[in-house]
Image: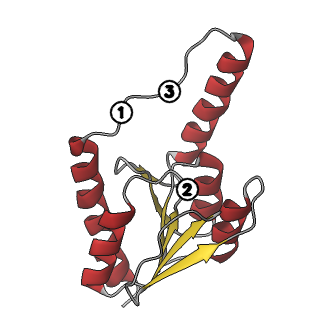
Amino acid sequence: MIYIDADACPVKAEVERVATRHGFKTFVVSNGGLRPSQNPLVENVIVPEGPDVADMWIADRAKGGDIVITGDIPLAAKCVEAGARVLKHNGEALTQANVGNALAMRDLMADLRSADPFRQGGGKPFSKADRSRFLDALEREVQKVKREFP
């Protein structure tokens, strides 16, 4: 299965395309406001509003053989710990080997932002190259899951 942390996810359509091609059930989890897919392999899950409700829904279900799409590092850490494969929107895989560093960097950046109210946050815009990298990475992860969990 594939779980998408869908609020602010720029690659929902790409995930649906790859998941459909491989026959993977996909859960698009959000607080609402998304147009439901007509694809029978895609289930839209609307969770109540509140901090991290969508994240908790995904973390409670993700396990080995699943793929989670998220930019949320704490959610990624929980899913990796549960054995799921995790991809960020730019195609970067978060694994046992690097999720701890990603979590530490996230915390450091939050501390820096809170210490300097004039510090401008925000990353670079999502590009076509990011989208392409994501599609390649998702295809690789799907192939690995199909080999490991036939």
The residue under label 2 is 7
In the image, residue 55 sits, relative to residue 40, either above or below, namely above
Discs 2, 1 touching: Cβ within 8 Å: no
Residue type at mark 1 is Pro
Discs 2, 3 touching: Cβ within 8 Å: no
Secondary structure type for disc 2: loop
| Residue in the image at 33% along x and 83% along y | 146
Circle 2 crowding by C-alpha within 10 Å: few under 14, some 14–19, many from 20: some
Residue type at mark 2 is Asp
The residue under label 1 is 125
Q: 68 or 141: which is nearer to us?
A: 68
Q: Which quarter of the rendering shows the C terminus?
A: bottom left
Q: Which quarter of the picture shows residue 11?
A: bottom left
The residue under label 3 is 122
| Residue in the image at 30% along x and 82% along y | 20
In the image, residue 129 sits, relative to residue 113, either above or below, namely below
Instruction: Give how far apart the Cα atoms at labels 1 and 3 are.
Output: 9 Å
Residue 25 visible within the image: yes
Residue type at mark 3 is Gly
Secondary structure type for disc 1: loop
Label whose residue precedes the other's in the sequence (2 or 1): 2
Q: Position of residue 147 (x, y in %)?
A: 31, 82
Label whose residue precedes the other's in the sequence (2 or 3): 2
Instruction: Give how far apart the Cα atoms at labels 2 and 1 are.
Output: 17 Å
Q: 136 or 32: which is nearer to us?
A: 32
Q: Position of residue 131 (x, y in %)?
A: 27, 50
Q: Position of residue 9 (x, y in %)?
A: 46, 54
In the image, residue 36 sits, relative to residue 31, either above or below, namely below
